[in-house]
Structure formats: structure tokens, C-alpha cells
Image (cartoon, helix red, strand yellow):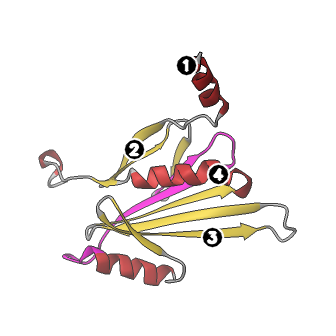
Amino acid sequence: MLGSLLVLVLAAGEPAETLTKYEVKTLALQVPSAWKQSEADGTQRFDDPSGDAYLLLDVGAVQTAGMKPQVCLEKILAAMGNENWKQLKLGKAPAARRVDTDTTPDGAESVETVTYVGCDGKTTWSLVFHMNVKQKDRFEALATKVANSLAYAKPSASKKGK
């Protein structure tokens, strides 16, 4: 009886998003399996089937050899405006998170944007989630899950020289 009740309670909640490993350049992360992936001008885009959210991923290389990860992050934040960033660690390297909300002029629709940026001294990246504020509870937790899954790829012997 208790087992049946537990199944009913779990089934009543939001369905859990299944995540799938995705790699781009020297970065790996888990993205929602059901989201449609596309690419334009080097930016990876993943769209939620409902149309209520999408995420953008950009990965690049640090142009200055030997740059310390924290210095690299500080340069990124300075270029993006230093205000409202919360510094943290993702993929064992310095990163930062900022949340912005935009509303249409008539106030009918609001969009929340959660931006993550980071650098390990070799690779720079940004991960930007756009979500309908009405679905914020569902997508904000998912954004955190995806960001926390981020990992820098270790150089492999087979890829050297390419």
C-alpha cells in the first residue's frame, strides 16, 4: 500500500528531464535528451519541445597562453559588465552566474535569462538559458543541473596534433 502511494506521489510531479552527454570542442555537459539541437555560427542551440525554453552554448579557446583561470574569468566578466555576477566553480574551474528578467513593453510576457560563463585557462565558454518566467520553477532547476554537469575534457593522446 505504501509503495502504491509513493508511486502516485512521484507520478504527480513534473516529469524528470532525461539528460544526455554532449561534447563540443574541449567541453562536455549533460543536456536534456528531448531538446532539439541545432548549430549556427559555432553556437550550439537546444530547444525545449514546448517552446518555453532554450539554451545556447558557446565554447572557445583562450588566446593568451598560460593565463590563470581566475584572470581569464575576470576578463570575461569585465567584457560582459561586472554587475550582478555570482562567482562559483563549475568543472573544477572558476565560473560565474547571472540572472536577468526581461518583460515585453505591455507586460504580458516575461523571459528569464540565466547566464553561466567560465574558463579553465585554456577553454572559455558561455551557457545561456532563456525561459518563460511562467515555467521558471521547472527550467531554473534544469539550468542548474546542466551547468553543474559541465566538465573540461582531458586531452587524449589520439587527438594531439589535430
For the point 30% across and 72% down, the residue is 62
Q: Amino acid at mark 2?
A: Tyr
In terms of sequence position, does the residue under pointer 2 or pointer 1 come before the other? 1
Q: Amino acid at mark 3?
A: Asp
115 sits left or right of 76 in the view: right
> What is the span of residues highlighted in magenta in the rendered image?
43-69
In terms of sequence position, does the residue under pointer 4 or pointer 1 come before the other? 1
Quarter holding residue 132: bottom right
Q: Which residue is mark 2?
A: 22
Q: Residue furthest left?
A: 157
User: Pointer 3: residues within 10 angstroms few (<14), some, or many (20+)?
Assistant: few
Residue 45 colored in magenta in the image:
yes
129 up-or-down from 30: above or below: below
Closer to viewer: mark 4 or mark 3: 4
67 up-or-down from 146: above or below: below
23 sits left or right of 19 in the view: left
Q: Which residue is mark 1?
A: 3
SS for dot 4:
helix
Q: Which residue is mark 4?
A: 137
Marks 3,2: beta carbons within 8 A: no
SS for dot 1:
helix
Mark number displayed over residue 100: 3
Marks 2,1: beta carbons within 8 A: no
